[in-house]
Image (cartoon, rainbow, N blue to C red):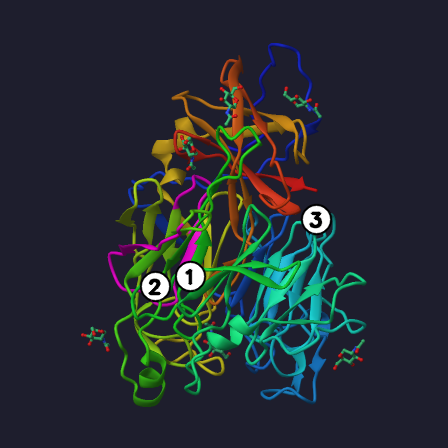
């Protein structure tokens, strides 16, 4: 069944401003306890190290320009000549593709400079602003603007503006005023804004980034810092075992949180993952701040990188998660155990408010050939119940340089894994060019009768306003949530800008046979939901619809 194709009469004669285009739901006829996996592409020609879903449902995927020749050619015989490339100076292959999940097709894109281990965020108008990388890409700004009505858009390199300093392994976050903050990078103990206001300095020193860096060569354990915009407009920044509440407008640390318990380190190369748990606006009436809680899972023990890198001894990874309610008077980490140890996990928030922890390895760390024992089992974490449930196993190892993103149809797209310096297809853990989709249990045939289909949204920019969504449904069980999900830029186990906002539902009523109308309050502030495109889901009895895109502006 497709969203938007079920017609029904609206009883009270309300007309709707926007008709939503249909979007396929991928359901299965087999038993789906624990969900199931589908390999959607055997090879996309590159290894999905970085991924971002765009507002036209397409996914921008890229690896790095100095991997040597990829398995997909640039179209029209275009080539990239770069005298500074360390692997291949004249390269006629692509290192980025645009993937269309609905059609299951892709086309090559042209990256001109090296975006290896870079960072990114969507601007308020839905352009991917992608920053930094390695070598000739250290200070680069690149962008990709979707082209839903033709299929010719490509990467743009911004040579008239550069980052103030090299940013390799930095993290980005979109801010309430629409600027993007870029924090850190290897040997860059600073942050900066893009675009810069007249009063902004080129960069600001942040000693926290230097203090959290472990001194042994390669052991840094503070790269790709975890960054989360909190609903009070401050930033939560985590690196190594440390975290701060940070006012980026005044360059001021407002609070230092307790160390995350345990000896484990949580950032690259002892890579863990981090999420801001869903911001639940239910019953707050737009007047109070929602509870903000961070959850960090996995990582590695001190020295794990050096042992793996030098001696090929692979320590068991961390099995703990820590949760911190940042606005408590006396915030304390609450520790929980995952069913298995995991380094390099991805943590993906579902529209239901649950978390899927997937990918990674049980031993070792991030870095070249530094991990063994891939974890095939994803785990479903329910924040309300604090429960971990093992899901159906994948069949492809997804370790260093793999990534995952939530798709608008509710699947999780999973790709990449290349623990080698170059493409290496015959290694024990080979370079992975494939793409998998993990289909959670809610996409199964058993859930079909309870699955809402969005028919129309009467306001596609519902910031600060009450708005209505009509949807169809075969069997009403009660319990409807309206959630906004910000699509993440995922790389190195961190889904930057990932955010789930559970809106305050004012009411829901039946307006036709199988037709319902839910009224909800849009986000109350740009700190709760920073500007940009969000996937709007209706969740009924734990089963989400396919998303439609709305804009917060
Ligand atoms: C990529 O291309 C190489 C060289 O043609 C080939 O040996 C290899 O099998 C291909 N890899 C995949 C995963 O398709
Ligand atoms: C940005 O960097 C590129 C490459 O190093 C350089 O060619 C360009 O002039 C720089 N732009 C500015 C505005 O400094
Ligand atoms: C929110 O509004 C509802 C209905 O008007 C009221 O019952 C409730 O007390 C309000 N809650 C807050 C926190 O103001
Ligand atoms: C993984 O770690 C466990 C626990 O330390 C250890 O027993 C096992 O040998 C390790 N596996 C590998 C392949 O190194
Ligand atoms: C949001 O909060 C409401 C009221 O406490 C609760 O019923 C609901 O389950 C919560 N939703 C999520 C996704 O956590
Ligand atoms: C959408 O519906 C809500 C709830 O009925 C109403 O308050 C709002 O004014 C409507 N918005 C538009 C743009 O029609």
Residue shown at the point (32%, 81%) measured from the top left: 303
Distance in Å between CA atoms under marks 2 and 1? 7 Å
Query: Magenta span covers which residues?
Result: 330-354
Residue shown at the point (58%, 87%) measured from the top left: 87
User: Which mark lies nearer to you, 3 or 2?
Assistant: 2
Distance in Å between CA atoms under marks 1 and 3? 32 Å
Specify whether tag 1 is near ligand 5 (CB below 8 Å): no
In the drawing, what numbered circle is on residue 282? none
- The answer to which of marks 1 and 3 sits earlier in the sequence is 3
Specify whether tag 3 is near ligand 6 (CB below 8 Å): no
Q: Is residue 434 visible?
A: no
Distance in Å between CA atoms under marks 3 and 2? 38 Å
Q: Is residue 204 visible?
A: yes
Question: Can you give x and y, in whole percent of width and height, for residue 450 in the image?
Answer: 41, 27
* Label 3 sits on residue: 148
- The answer to which of marks 3 and 2 sits earlier in the sequence is 3
* Label 2 sits on residue: 298
């Amino acid at each position: 069944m497709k969203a938007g194709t079920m017609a029904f009469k609206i009883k009270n004669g309300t007309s709707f401003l926007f008709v939503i285009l249909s979007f396929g739901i991928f359901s299965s006829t087999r038993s789906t306890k624990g969900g199931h996996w589908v390999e959607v592409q055997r090879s996309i020609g590159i290894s999905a190290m970085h991924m971002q879903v765009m507002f036209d449902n397409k996914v921008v995927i890229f690896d790095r320009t100095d991997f040597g020749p990829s398995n997909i050619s640039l179209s029209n015989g275009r080539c990239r000549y770069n005298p500074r490339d360390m692997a291949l100076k004249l390269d006629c292959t692509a290192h980025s593709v645009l993937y269309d999940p609905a059609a299951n097709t892709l086309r090559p894109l042209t990256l001109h400079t090296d975006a290896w281990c870079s960072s990114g965020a969507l601007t308020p108008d839905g352009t991917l602003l992608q920053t930094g990388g390695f070598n000739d890409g250290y200070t680069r700004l690149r962008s990709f603007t979707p082209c839903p009505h033709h299929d010719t858009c490509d990467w743009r390199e911004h040579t008239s503006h550069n980052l103030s300093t090299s940013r390799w392994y930095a993290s980005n976050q979109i801010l309430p005023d629409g600027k993007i903050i870029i924090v850190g990078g290897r040997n860059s103990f600073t942050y900066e804004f893009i675009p810069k206001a007249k009063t902004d300095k080129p960069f600001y020193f942040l000693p926290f980034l230097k203090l959290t860096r472990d001194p042994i060569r390669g052991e840094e354990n503070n790269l790709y810092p975890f960054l989360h915009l909190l609903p009070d407009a401050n930033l939560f920044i985590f690196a190594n075992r440390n975290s701060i509440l940070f006012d980026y407008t005044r360059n001021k640390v407002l609070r230092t949180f307790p160390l995350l318990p345990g000896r484990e380190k949580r950032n690259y190369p002892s890579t863990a993952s981090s999420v801001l748990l869903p911001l639940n606006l239910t019953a707050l009436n737009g007047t109070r701040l929602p509870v903000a809680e961070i959850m960090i899972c996995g990582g590695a023990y001190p020295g794990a990188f050096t042992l793996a890198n030098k001696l090929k001894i692979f320590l068991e990874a961390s099995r703990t998660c820590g949760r911190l309610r940042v606005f408590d008077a006396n915030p304390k980490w609450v520790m929980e155990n995952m069913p298995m140890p995991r380094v390099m996990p991805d943590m993906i928030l579902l529209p239901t408010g649950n978390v899927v922890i997937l990918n990674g390895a049980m031993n070792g760390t991030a870095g070249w050939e530094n991990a063994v024992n891939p974890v095939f089992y994803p785990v479903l974490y329910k924040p309300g119940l604090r429960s971990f449930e093992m899901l159906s196993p994948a069949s492809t190892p997804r370790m260093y340089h793999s990534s995952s993103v939530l798709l608008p149809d509710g699947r999780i797209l999973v790709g990449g894994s290349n623990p080698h310096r170059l493409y290496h297809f015959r290694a024990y853990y080979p370079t992975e060019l494939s793409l998998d989709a993990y289909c959670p249990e809610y996409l199964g045939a058993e859930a079909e009768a309870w699955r809402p289909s969005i028919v129309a949204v009467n306001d596609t920019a519902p910031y600060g306003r009450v708005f209505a969504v009509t949807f169809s449904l075969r069997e009403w069980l009660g319990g409807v949530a309206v959630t906004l999900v910000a699509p993440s830029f995922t790389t190195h186990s961190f889904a930057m800008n990932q955010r789930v906002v559970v809106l305050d539902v004012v009411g829901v009523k039946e307006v036709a046979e199988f037709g319902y109308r839910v009224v909800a309050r849009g986000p109350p502030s740009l700190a709760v939901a920073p500007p940009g495109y969000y996937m709007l889901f209706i969740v009924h009895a734990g089963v989400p619809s396919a998303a439609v895109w709305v804009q917060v502006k």
